[in-house]
Image (cartoon, helix red, strand yellow):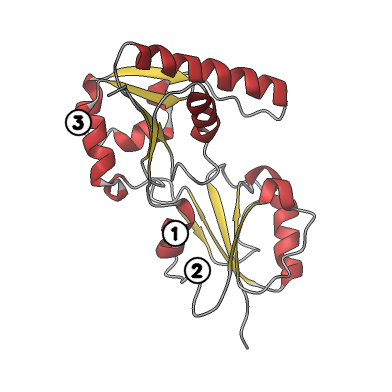
Amino acid sequence: MRATAYGVGVGPGDPELMSLKAVRLIRENRVIAVPGKDPKESVAYQIAAAVPELAEKELLAVHMPMVKDREKLAEAHRKGAEMLEEVLDRGENVVYLTLGDPTVYCTFSYLEHILEADGYPVELVPAVPSFCAAAARLNLSLAEWDEPLHVIPAVHKTDAPLDQPGTYVLMKSASHMAEAKKLLLDSGRDVAAVENCGMENERIYRSVEEIPDDAGYFSLIIAKERHD
């Protein structure tokens, strides 16, 4: 069998939420890829460090810049995929650690498309998504009965009203928090948010007014429809 690239979700922050499969793959494979210039500074690595065997692995730093320039992004994704392909061509699996779940706004998806187009086997290993962990931390149900659930990247949607029935989850809102807060206030919804869910510096906010404009990158907002 050919070597496989695994996109392994490590969950939102609490190491105890890692799946048994994620832990097994970290233990069984020698090469672990981590997004970032310094693997050990990556949040995904710090979560997975709860697996003692990780300290013995060969780490592969895959730089994934946070820019909007599509050409620069494409170049970075190609370089990252080629790094993984070098390992696969040696006949070794490579495990790419990713925060949250690899199917939800995940940088690994860009590498996955390139790897598959180049003919390499890829397997995704699901994890607890950040919005599920945040809802649990807030003791909120995301959807009941026939309520729809809308998961949107707020960084791209701050000009669209939250006017559909059901619950909204706003991800990637930190860089446009002021605009997102105005959108939330205009919606008339009940709002709560978690910053750094499951991490040591976790913070919880129970209203729009409590959310600081400079909330950190890992901030997730849940806006529920009011039922009077």
Residue 4 x, y percent position in the rendering: 34, 26
Q: Judge left or right: residue 115 versus residue 22.
A: right
Please tell me whether mark 3 or mark 1 is closer to you in this view.
1
Identified at 57% across, 22% down, the residue is 77
Mark 2 and mark 1 in contact (Cβ < 8 Å)? yes
Is 141 rendered above or below residue 172?
Answer: below
Instruction: Examine the image and state in which quarter residue 61 appears.
Output: top left
What residue did someone put label 3 on? 52
Of the numbered discs 3 and 2, the one sitting upstream in the chain is: 3
What residue did someone put label 2 on? 142
* Of residues 74 and 156, the one drawn nearer to the viewer in this rendering: 74
Q: Secondary structure at mark 2?
A: loop
Q: Which quadrant: the N terminus? A: top left
Q: Which quadrant: the C terminus? A: bottom right
Residue 211 x, y percent position in the rendering: 61, 57
Q: What amino acid is found at the position of numbered circle 3 in the picture?
A: Pro
Identified at 46% across, 23% down, the residue is 119
Identified at 75% across, 60% down, the residue is 182
Of the numbered discs 1 and 2, the one sitting upstream in the chain is: 1
What residue did someone put label 1 on? 132
* Of residues 82 and 130, the one drawn nearer to the viewer in this rendering: 82
Q: Judge left or right: residue 89 versus residue 134.
A: left
Q: Judge left or right: residue 201 versus residue 105.
A: left
